[in-house]
Image: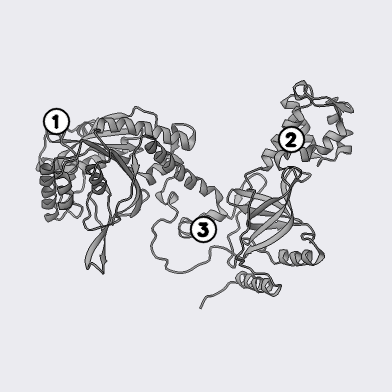
Amino acid sequence: MQQLSEQEIVRREALQSLRDLGVDPFPAEKFDVNFKSSDFTTNQFRKQLTSEIEKIKDIGPVKAEQIRDILLQNKFRVAQILELEDFKAFDLGEMIEFDAGLGREPERLEEFLSNLRTVALGPFAPANFPTVKVAGRFMGKRGAFAQLQDSEGRIQVYLGKGNIGENEEEQELNKSIIKLLHIGDFIGLEGELFSTQTGEITVRPAVFRFLGKSIRNLPIVKRDSEGNVYDAFTDPEQRYRQRYVDLTVNPQVRDAFLKRTKIINTMRNFFNEKGWLEVETPILQPIHGGAAARPFVTHHNTLDMPLYLRIANELYLKRLIVGGFDGVYEFGKMFRNEGMDRTHNPEFTAMEIYVAYKDYIWMMEMVEQLLEATAIAVNGTPEVEYDGKMISFKGPYERLSMYESIEKYTGIDVSQMDEEELKGVCKQLHIEIDESMGKGKLIDEIFGEKVEDHLIQPTYITDYPIEMTPLAKKHRSREGLVERFELFVNGKEIANAYSELNDPIDQRERFEDQLKLAERGDEEAMVLDEDFLRALEYGMPPTSGLGIGIDRLTMMLTNQYSIQDVLFFPQMKPETSSSDVSEEVTE
C-alpha cells in the first residue's frame, strides 16, 4: 500500500475539496494559449521603456537609462518624480518635444510619464492585445502575486483579492480555488498584460481555469535576488530517473535538449538541400551486422526465430544504394549490449549517410562543412568550450594515418609488425590483451590507450589496417590498409567513415575472416550476411559512408560532461527503493 507523506495527504484533501466545490481537478476541455512567458519579458519591457524615453529630443541612450531607473526606483509615482532634484537636472520642462523624424506633436511631460508604462507594452498593450491567455504550473504565491511557469520560463500573475470572474458567485468560487492551490498545479488565465509599479510584466486575469492537480510535492529550488540557488535538485541519480522533475525545477537543463534538436535539424536540412533521402531501416534484424559489437537478442514468437536489436544500420542503407538511390541517410537508435560510462549508453542515437560516386577524401571535406555549419547554428560560432578547452570545428582538420599517430605518440612504428610482435609492443606499453585479439584488435588497443587522449582539436585518423575494418575498401595505393577515417575530438571518436567496399568476393573473404575471430572467442566479430553479399553481387557503385554519434556530438556542442545529460531518459539500474525527491515545504 502506498505510504503518503503529510504534505501528500494535504494535497489529496485539496483534491477532494476541489471536487466538493464542483470543480473537475482534471478537466477534459482544451485551453487555448496565445501568449508565452518569453513573448514579452520584464527585461524586454525595460528596454522598451528606454527606447520610448530616447524619443524625447536631445535625450541619448545614457540619459534615457538614467530616467528609466528613476521611474522604476520611484514606482512611477509621477507627481513625486517631477519634484526630485535628480529628475529636474534633466531640465525637460513642462512640455517635451520629440525627435524630428518621428513626426510627433509636443506633449506634456506629466502626461508622457503617466502613459509610459502602458505605451512601453507596445503590441501587448491592452488596446492592441486585449486578452492574453496563459497556462502553466502555479509555482508559488506571495501576497497578491503568483508565479506561473510555462514551457518558456516564468511570468508573474496578479491573483488579487478574490475579484477574478464575471460575477460575485464566480469570484467567490475562484477565491476558494486559489486557496487550494499547491506548487505544481496547472492553471489557465485569461486577462490583460500590465506592468507593476516596479516594472514587472504581469498578467491581470479576468478568467481563471483549474487545469490539473499535482498530488506529489515538487522539490522547491530557491533563488535570491542575485540569482543564487539554494536547495537545488542536483542529485544525478534522481535527476536522471525523474527527468520530468528535473525539467520542471531546473529549467536550465532544457537548453541542452533544445540544442540537441537543433543539431539534428541542422544536419537534416544540410542533407536535404543536397537532395539526399531520409529513410528508415529495420531495428529488429535477423543478423547483427554493420559493426563490431555485442547485440541484444530477442525472440519473435510468430516466426519462432531469434532477432537482434540493430547495432548498426549500415548494411540496409547500402542495400538502398544498390537499389539506385544516390544518397540516403537515417537518424536512428542503435543498441549495443556493452559497458556503460560517461560517454557510452547501451541505447544511443547515430546518423549514418551513404552517398554514391564519392570516396572518403570527399567525405572528410563534407564533414568539415557539416560540423562547422552545425556548430554555428547551435552556438553562433564554430568555436565551442568543452571540458575546459576551446575547440574549433572550423575546417580543415588535421589528418594523421593510424600508423603515423601511433608512432607520433609512442615512438614505435607498428606498420610492419605481425600479431606476435604487436603482442610484444602491448606488453612493453603495459596494455592488457587476451588471446582472442587478432592483429586489428591489438593495433586498436595501442591506439586507444596511447593516442586518443592527445587528439583534442578535431583530427582525422585515416588509413586503418584491413583487419580492423571488414566493410571498407582496400586502400588505392597502400597495401594492407583500407580507406577509412575516424574523427576524434577531445579524445573521443564522434564520426567514422569509409570508402565502402563494393567488391562482393573481397567482402565475403573478410566476413569469413571475422568468423575465424568469432571462433577464437571474439564476441564482437561480425557475422556473415548472405543477403547483403547477394545485394553486392548485383553491383554497388563507388560509395562513401559516414556515421556520426549524435549523443557525443551534442555533449561537445553543449559542454556536457556526461552522456546522461544529453539523453532525456538514460539507462539506469533498477531502483532499490522508492523515495520522494522532495521534503515537506510550506507553499
What is the C-alpha distance between the residues marked 2 and 1? 69 Å
The disc label shown at residue 220, or none: none
Q: Is residue 163 visible?
A: yes
Q: Residue furthest bottom?
A: 1
What is the C-alpha distance between the residues marked 3 and 2? 37 Å
Give the secondary structure at mark 2: helix
Residue at (31%, 33%) from the top-left corner?
459
Residue at (38%, 45%) from the top-left corner?
550
Q: Nearer the viewer, mark 3 or mark 2?
A: 2
Residue that carries the numbered disc 3 in the rendered image: 244
Crowd band around label 3 with a 10 angstrom C-alpha radius: few (<14), some (14–19), many (20+): few
Residue that carries the numbered disc 1 in the rendered image: 478
What is the C-alpha distance between the residues marked 1 and 3? 53 Å
Give the secondary structure at mark 1: loop
Name the one closer to the observer, 444 or 346: 346
Residue that carries the numbered disc 2 in the rendered image: 49
Give yes or no for contact between labels 1 and 3 (Cβ–Cβ under 8 Å).
no
Crowd band around label 2 with a 10 angstrom C-alpha radius: few (<14), some (14–19), many (20+): many
Residue at (86%, 38%) from the top-left corner?
78
**Rendering coords of residue 461 (x, y %):** 26, 34
